[in-house]
Amino acid sequence: MPTSSRANAVTVIGLGSMGRQIVRTYLAADFAVTVWNRTPGKAVDLGAPCAETAAEAVAAAQLIVLSLTHYDAMDAILGPIDLTGKVVVNLSSDSPRRTREGAAFVRARGGEFLAGGVMAQPAELASASAYIFYSGPRAVFQAQRELLQPLAATEYLGADDGAAQVYYQAMLALFLPLLLGYEQALAIIDRSGSEIARFLPYAQRSLGSVGDLYAAWAVMAEEGGPADPAYLSMMAAGARHVVETATAVGVDTVLAESVSSHWEHAVAASASTFQLLHR
């Protein structure tokens, strides 16, 4: 499969839910898209030509966009392939350390590399709310920026290859417990005999002040974290009441217990510090 002569050619490797949406987004933007997936058959309904091998897919375009489960998959797929003249943009999730290793892996095979972290659900790509963290050499990012913009707004974080994953994983650390906490809140409402639809507006209203709360906590974090014993005791008591409420209606308390334990430790640490300061 020869390299496409079109300036807006791209190869997409990995056709999970995000990879498939990446393909659809590029096709909607009138890109020449070539696809490849380790499990055959996922490209049938996408409307893009499917290369027979990964090597053929890489040969079809200069820009290679990866959407895989982790960086080990990239190593397995691209390991035998000469990447000279190619730009690999890996939008897969992994640790910052593994991302830096992946960048070296690509460059050792002659390619250029950018790491990405997609801050959107698949259906949200190309929407006003979607954005993607990128990191890697600035010159490489600037050269590819126009080809990356159809997917989502670009947020360049610097030359450190691992920076995009630092920010992406930090956002996941924020989002995943929030989503699980919301799921448990809905379970408490439902099992207590109330209606989820009635609760929803209150849950949505609570998000209105989160921006200010994040700003306040960022200041506290820079100063070493919340230290007021009365505040910590209040948070610990509230967290314990969540555990008791969830237990009473049969909702799993693993997350709630972890949160409660955190605040109890914070109270204990604060008390120790207070005692040391007032001897």
Image: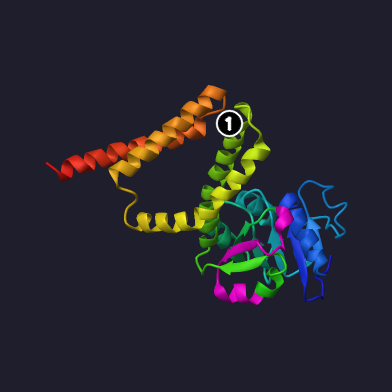
* Image quadrant where one finds the N terminus: bottom right
In terms of image quadrants, where is residue 192?
top right
- Give x and y (percent) for residue 144: 66, 73
* Of 5 and 166, the residue lying toward us: 166
**Which residue in the protein does label 1 denote?**
188
- Give x and y (percent) for residue 208: 55, 54
- Residue 272 as seen in the image, left or right of residue 235: left
Magenta segment: does it hold 186?
Answer: no
Magenta segment: does it hold 127?
Answer: yes
Give the total number of marks visible in the rendering: 1
Secondary structure under tag 1 reads helix
- 240 up-or-down from 103: above or below: above
* Of 268 and 79, the residue lying toward us: 268
- Give x and y (percent) for residue 80: 69, 56
Give the magenta range: 122-143
* Image quadrant where one finds the C terminus: top left
Tag 1: residue type?
Ile
- Give x and y (percent) for residue 266: 33, 40
Q: Residue furthest left?
A: 279
- 246 up-or-down from 102: above or below: above
Q: Which residue is drawn at 58% across and 35% down?
A: 184
Q: Residue at x 61, y 61 (%)?
A: 116
Colour scheme of the rendered structure:
rainbow
